[in-house]
Image: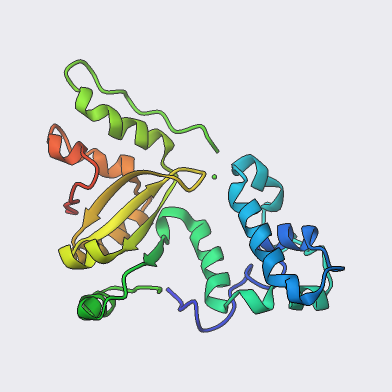
Amino acid sequence: MQSTADKIFEGAELGKLPFDIFALERWDYSRPVEQDQEQWDHLAREWLDLDARGRHPYHPLTPESREAPATAEQMSRVLVPRQTMKERNLSVVTEMGHGSPVWLRTCYSPELASVYTEWCDSMELDSLDDVGEYYDPPGEGEEFKMPLYEAKLKEKTMMFLIDEEALRDNLIKVLWLDIHGACVWDNRLPPDDMLAFKGRMFDGGSLADLSEEFEDDEEMYERGAVLNIN
């Protein structure tokens, strides 16, 4: 995959991202420039509070159809100081859902830096509708499968989390998210299995797809179970 730090991706240009349109429409340009960061933070919180229906108007069908409601000068004031090229490109890449999830690193402990470096060397690290699909519900005697079944109905995408626990255990955390960005299920993945896992996801994989291989192994129906990618 092309590095998100090399050049701006198509669809990530200023004024093209859904949040761009939201922020530019609501920005109060009469306020002093010194208050811009405060205004940005407030709009970011408003955006995060929106559900999928509230964000829908800011997601035109194609990037080409997105038109920023602002001048180049206004976009330079609002967007340029607060977004890196990598951040903007990631907003486009993650629209692919399972095929290109975000990596979130929260641990920068010096003693664990070598583990993170090894992961980067072995993997390509680049540091939504409420109605779920239909799956047969668990039958009698399979009550232990119900939490995962409910998660499969809600899950829309995923992200990888690298926190202190992940680095110490040498297991990447896989967070399965619903359309609102809430984590509905989580697994752990050995770094050596990452390439095979990404291949499964690019081929249309999902939490539901992976769970077909769990059969009646009760441990695999517990949150945090270690995935075994064949």
Q: Nearer the viewer, residue 83 or 227?
A: 83
- Tell me: residue 22, above or below residue 125: above
The spot of residue 22 in percent (x, y) is 72, 57
Q: How many marks?
A: 0
Task: Single out the residue that lies furthest toward the bottom.
Answer: 6
The spot of residue 67 in percent (x, y) is 78, 62
Q: Is residue 81 left or right of residue 167?
A: right
Q: Nearer the viewer, residue 33 or 100?
A: 33
Q: Does the rendering let one see residue 152?
A: yes
> In the figure, residue 23 lies in which quadrant?
bottom right
Q: Nearer the viewer, residue 126 or 28?
A: 28
Q: Does the rendering let one see residue 16?
A: no
Q: Quadrant of the N terminus?
A: bottom left
- Tell me: residue 149, above or below residue 75: above
Q: Residue at x 33, y 74 (%)?
A: 124
- Tell me: residue 15, above or below residue 81: above
The spot of residue 198 in percent (x, y) is 31, 61
Task: Single out the residue that lies furthest toward the top.
Answer: 140
Q: Is residue 66 left or right of residue 83?
A: right
Q: Is residue 55 left or right of residue 117?
A: right
Q: Residue at x 55, y 38 (%)?
A: 129
- Tell me: residue 33, above or below residue 23: below
> In the figure, residue 215 lies in which quadrant?
top left
> In the figure, residue 122 lies in which quadrant?
bottom left
Q: Residue at x 64, y 67 (%)?
A: 11
The spot of residue 172 in percent (x, y) is 25, 61
Q: Residue at x 18, y 51 (%)?
A: 226
